[in-house]
Image: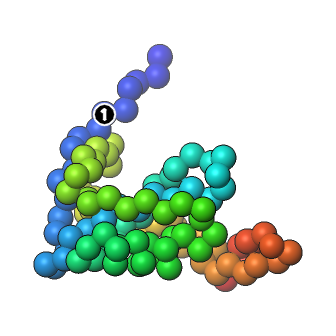
Amino acid sequence: MVEKTVRSRVDGQSLGSSPRWEVFVRDEASDPLTYAGSVVAADGETAHEHASRLFGWYAVEVWVCPADDVERYSSRENEPDDGSRAPGDGTEPRVYEETEGTPRARER
């Protein structure tokens, strides 16, 4: 029998005086929204500008919402929720180039 994942509520941490915004993107009109990350900005318009540059290069939609309005739950205990933890194990490709209209990952 498979055990159900146990998640605990994660309290958001403020990063300075500006609020944090959660970012969701849709790459194609038929795709579901997916979580992309978070940005820190004074207002929604600025958050959208930052999110578009960071996460929405090819997205048809970019949604931002105040992080304080999002309830987070995680099965990972005692991990900071301040963006200080690097994703993956360092083997993820970080540079993208466009070839024939399709984004491709290039190994570093």
Is residue 18 visible from the viewing direction of this image? yes
Question: In the rendered image of this protein, does residue 35 appear above or below residue 8?
Answer: below
Q: Where, by quadrant of the figure, is residue 96 drawn?
A: bottom right
Which residue sits furthest front? 45
Question: In the rendered image of this protein, does residue 15 appear above or below residue 37?
Answer: below
Q: Position of residue 63 (x, y in %)?
A: 43, 59
Q: Where, by quadrant of the figure, is residue 98 drawn?
A: bottom right
**Marker count (numbered):** 1
Question: In the rendered image of this protein, does residue 89 appear above or below residue 49?
Answer: above
**Could you classify mark 1 by the number of other residues whose Cα lies within 10 Å: few (under 14), some (14-19), or many (20 or more)?**
few
Q: Position of residue 72 (x, y in %)?
A: 27, 48
Which residue sits furthest right? 100
Q: Position of residue 33 (x, y in %)?
A: 52, 50
Instruction: Give me the residue at 73% from left, 81% from top.
Output: 97
What is the basis of the colouring in this image?
Answer: rainbow
Q: Is 71 or 93 nearer to us in this picture?
A: 71
Instruction: Give me the residue at 17% from left, 54% from top.
Output: 11
Three-letter code for the amino acid on which mark 1 is drawn: Val
Instruction: Give me the residue at 32% from left, 58% from top.
Output: 65
Residue bearing mark 1: 6
Q: Position of residue 88 (x, y in %)?
A: 50, 64
Which residue sits furthest left? 17
Q: Is residue 35 left or right of residue 19?
A: right
Q: Where, by quadrant of the figure, is residue 9 drawn?
A: top left
Q: Is 33 or 16 nearer to us in this picture?
A: 33
Is residue 85 visible from the viewing direction of this image? no
Regarding mark 1 in the picture, which secondary structure is present there?
loop
Instruction: Give me the residue at 26% from left, 73% from top.
Output: 43
